Image (cartoon, grey):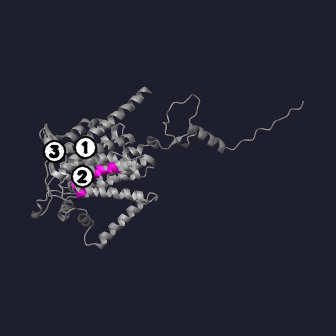
């Protein structure tokens, strides 16, 4: 008994520490060279917790191995293979090693250390704390154009490049500690639905609005159309869920309607769906023009190299487009670098977590945690069509993929709701209590569920007639 309690205490202490360190390290702007490797704050954390996280997954500490785990591992190995096919082992062995770490370790940290609703809430809480710390610097940067955090860290270590853009909406774009202003907005945006449904569970409307106002303010300071789109999608899904909260099939209706609209737009317009999307979901016409042309020419490279992609080679484009050296579409970059198998494996892992989570019967705080997670992941995946994810933001995506797999192994006693418990006959009865089911009780006394089950069984049985009394003659 003593050993079991000590193990539970260690898990609760170690897990939150890892989550806090990793989330804080995502916001660190510095990097340095060590033994020929470029290391940053989050890479140090990944290296330190790499072995415990992977061993925790292999030994069952993260629950049973699931299909999404295999898809993520397969994507990491296929992507690494595509790099080696395109560039050889000698040229990119260090890059491939770092890529494997950045792809797998954040995912396994989430899988191993987020194993309860309490740990999941702790992750969201620290996510909000990091954004709250960055928000004043983002506001200052938006108004003045100065980057105080990059300047402070830059006096000691190498930091990310400072970006200067023309004003948008009369303001300057905030970069804070991220490699690019758009990454700052995309990094903060997933906290929108998470804070509302996870941290806001059981709290007043004013508290919920306070949480999402912090996130919305940080996203606004990035002045990025991709980040705006992320929050707009989350807000729309949250509004849909509230408006049709009494409709059981509301999500099926939404998906069917969206698919119908896509079909009508494809048939009735002289532009494809991506061109329509890029035109109306950007802040400037020049951005839309660049993304449409980038998509068209990058697609040609994909069709010429459909299996292994082109790796890190430059994509083909006309001379007048050579100043546009970036591809602002994460899913397009994945396909271009690793071919269609890479896209199907990574996108398949996203679809797997959706399909498995929605089939899990949940109520109460667990159901809201799942809803907030899926809405947050939806916003990030859709907005990734308008932005490429790299460095800490890519690691955060992989971390987020594994952050809610624990709920597949959860029962509803984790948030104090009713759970199904087997009775003495092996049948299941409902346990209606917020007290732990293993509390000590006086010897010989039954707990309430057992008493209810015993009475129900006895009342449902047919009474046997007593045997006839025989009278012996004297």
Question: N-terminal of the two: label 3 or label 2?
Answer: 3
Q: Gap in Å between the C-alphas at discs 3 and 2?
A: 18 Å
Could you tell me which secondary element the residue under label 2 belongs to? helix
Q: Nearer the viewer, residue 386 or 416?
A: 416
Could you tell me which secondary element the residue under label 1 belongs to? helix
Does the residue at mark 3 contact the one at mark 1 (Cβ under 8 Å)? no
Q: Residue placed farthest to the top in the image?
A: 2
Question: N-terminal of the two: label 1 or label 2?
Answer: 1
Q: Position of residue 52 (x, y in %)?
A: 30, 35
Could you tell me which secondary element the residue under label 3 belongs to? helix
Which label lies toward us, 1 or 2? Answer: 1
Q: Nearer the viewer, residue 208 or 51?
A: 208
Residue 453: quarter of image: top right
Q: Position of residue 89 (x, y in %)?
A: 16, 45
Magenta segment: 209-226
Q: Residue at x 25, y 41 (%)?
A: 24
**From where the camera sits, is residue 325 visible?**
yes
The residue that label 2 is drawn on is 185
Answer few, some or many: residues within 10 Å of disc 3's Cα (few below 14, many 20 plus, some between 14 and 19). Answer: some
The residue that label 3 is drawn on is 148
Residue 133's disc is 1
Q: Is residue 148 above or below residue 12?
A: below
């Amino acid at each position: 008994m003593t050993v079991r309690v000590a193990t539970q205490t260690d898990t609760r202490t170690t897990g939150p520490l890892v989550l806090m360190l990793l989330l804080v390290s995502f916001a660190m702007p510095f990097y340095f060279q060590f033994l020929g490797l470029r290391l940053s704050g989050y890479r140090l954390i990944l290296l330190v917790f790499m072995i415990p996280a992977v061993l925790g997954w292999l030994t069952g500490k993260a629950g049973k191995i699931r299909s999404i785990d295999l898809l993520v591992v397969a994507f990491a190995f296929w992507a690494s293979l595509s790099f080696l096919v395109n560039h050889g082992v000698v040229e990119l062995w260090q890059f491939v090693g770092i890529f494997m770490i950045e792809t797998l370790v954040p995912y396994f940290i989430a899988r191993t250390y987020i194993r309860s609703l309490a740990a999941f809430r702790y992750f969201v809480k620290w996510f909000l704390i990091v954004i709250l710390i960055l928000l004043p610097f983002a506001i200052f940067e938006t108004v003045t154009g100065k980057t105080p955090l990059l300047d402070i860290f830059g006096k000691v270590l190498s930091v990310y490049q400072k970006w200067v853009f023309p004003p948008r909406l009369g303001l300057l774009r905030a970069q804070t500690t991220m490699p690019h202003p758009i990454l700052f907005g995309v990094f903060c945006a997933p906290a929108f639905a998470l804070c509302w449904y996870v941290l806001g569970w059981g709290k007043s409307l004013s508290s919920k609005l306070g949480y999402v106002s912090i996130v919305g303010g940080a996203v606004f300071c990035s002045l990025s159309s991709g980040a705006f789109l992320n929050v707009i999608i989350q807000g729309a899904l949250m509004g849909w869920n509230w408006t049709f909260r009494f409709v059981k099939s509301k999500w099926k209706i939404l998906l069917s309607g969206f698919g119908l609209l896509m079909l009508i737009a494809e048939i009735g317009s002289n532009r494809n769906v991506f061109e329509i999307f890029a035109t109306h979901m950007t802040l400037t016409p020049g951005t839309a023009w660049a993304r449409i042309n980038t998509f068209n020419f990058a697609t040609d490279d994909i069709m010429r190299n459909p299996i292994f992609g082109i790796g890190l080679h430059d994509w083909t484009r006309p001379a007048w487009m050579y100043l546009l050296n970036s591809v602002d579409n994460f899913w397009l970059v994945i396909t271009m670098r690793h071919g269609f198998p890479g896209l199907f494996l990574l996108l398949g892992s996203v679809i797997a977590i959706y399909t498995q989570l929605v089939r899990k019967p949940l109520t109460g705080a667990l159901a809201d945690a799942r809803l907030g997670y899926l809405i947050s992941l939806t916003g990030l995946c859709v907005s990734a069509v308008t932005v490429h994810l790299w460095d800490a933001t890519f690691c955060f995506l992989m971390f987020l993929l594994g952050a809610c797999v624990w709920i597949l192994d959860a029962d509803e006693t984790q948030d104090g709701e009713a759970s199904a418990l087997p009775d003495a006959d092996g049948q299941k009865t409902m346990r209606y209590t917020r007290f732990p089911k293993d509390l000590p009780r006086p010897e010989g006394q039954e707990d309430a569920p057992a008493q209810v089950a015993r009475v129900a069984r006895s009342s449902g049985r047919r009474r046997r007639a007593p045997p006839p009394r025989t009278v012996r003659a004297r």
